[in-house]
Amino acid sequence: MPLPGLSILKQDYLFGISLFDGNGNMYPDEAISRWLDKAVGWLEYELDVAIKPTLIQEDHDYNAEDYQAFCYINLYQFPVIEVESLTAGYGGQIIMTFPQDWIKLYPESGQIQLVPTIGSMSTILLEQGAGILLPLITGALSTMPHLFQVAYTTGFGKFVYSGTAQTGGSQGSVILDPGASNQDNAYNGMRIIFYDGVCLGQAADILAYSGETFTATLKPDSSFPDLSPLANIPDGCSYKIFQDTADANIAELVAMKASIGILTVLGDILYQPGVASSSLSLDGISQSFSLTRSAQGGAYSGRIKQYEERIDRELGLLKKRYQGFRLNVA
């Protein structure tokens, strides 16, 4: 399911809550979006996984036993959306790039194996890398550090589109290629990742998209805090667009965590901070009311407490799932 956005948060988690202060000023959508971003960052830290799609590049050692098990590699991050490349390198040089159709991915556990297609192994060994790879295959060497380099996209997300960026963007926007959608707002709320060039490995959320000019306006985040390189992006810089999705439990935790921050603020601005009761008397007529809160809890302390209890319960279950042992598939 998609990660919660403004509409889901307001309809399902803030339903019945006034988003206005005592002067009629509405709590801004930008502030709600920031609470959602903070909630995603908090949960990524707690689970030690990437929720939003993220490009990872890492090295792995050669081990004879793993190599004989169809080059079994346990990636450092999971789940994995797709493997971008797998190479073997030595002395700072790439000696072999493994074909994509060799790579067998187990997305949920973040494990990969190499299964060569029929007749392809001998051709590759003759054309490249034989001097290094043959001693490994024949068992003359049992280990070699940092032999394999893997680039992959981790996180929860659904691939939507890939292409090459065009020149002419600004500091906060990028021009997609003409093959992209010509519908306005087609990629709003989605995530773009750059896979080469000056923006290699950087990612950002798409705030707005113009189908007429193929221009995506981006929102800076921790992965891409400085958008200025977009103004000088060269033709041919590849990118991919993903729709943010997640396990239902993860999406709910993000929504509840964001709601707690919002409710805390709204509870203080609805009435004066620290006020638990109030009374008014005029010409012998008096009226008083008490808030369903402690003097420190805020007007919405009841709902906050409910969300906190559910988060504590569900977070423990998710940690068992994503921080437990990953069983070998080899």
Image: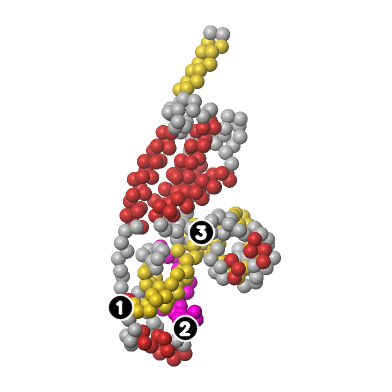
Against 26, is 55 above or below?
below
Is residue 95 rendered magenta in the image?
yes
Residue extending farthest to the right is 168
Real-space Cα distance between discs 3 and 2? 35 Å
SS at circle 3: strand
Residue with the mark numbered 1: 65
Three-letter code, disc 1:
Glu
Point 40% across, 66% down: residue: 76
Quarter residue 132 falls in: bottom left
Mark earlier in primary sequence (3, 2): 2
The span picked out in magenta is: 79-103
Regarding residue 162, the answer to whether it shows in the image is no
Q: Are marks 1 and 3 in contact (CB under 8 Å)?
A: no
The colour scheme used to paint the residues is secondary structure
Secondary structure predominantly adopted by residues drawn in magenta: strand
Point 47% across, 66% down: residue: 56
Residue 32 spot, x, y in % from top left: 54, 44
Real-space Cα distance between discs 2 and 1? 21 Å
Residue with the mark numbered 2: 95
Quarter residue 109 falls in: bottom left
Residue extending farthest to the top is 284
Mark earlier in primary sequence (1, 3): 1
Mark earlier in primary sequence (2, 1): 1
Against 33, is 146 above or below?
below
Residue 176 spot, x, y in % from top left: 63, 65
Residue with the mark numbered 3: 243
Point 52% across, 35% down: residue: 266
Estimate how packed mark 3 is, as few (under 14), some (14 to 19) or many (20 or more) residues with alpha carbons within 10 Å: many
* Nearest to viewer (mark 1 / mark 3): 1
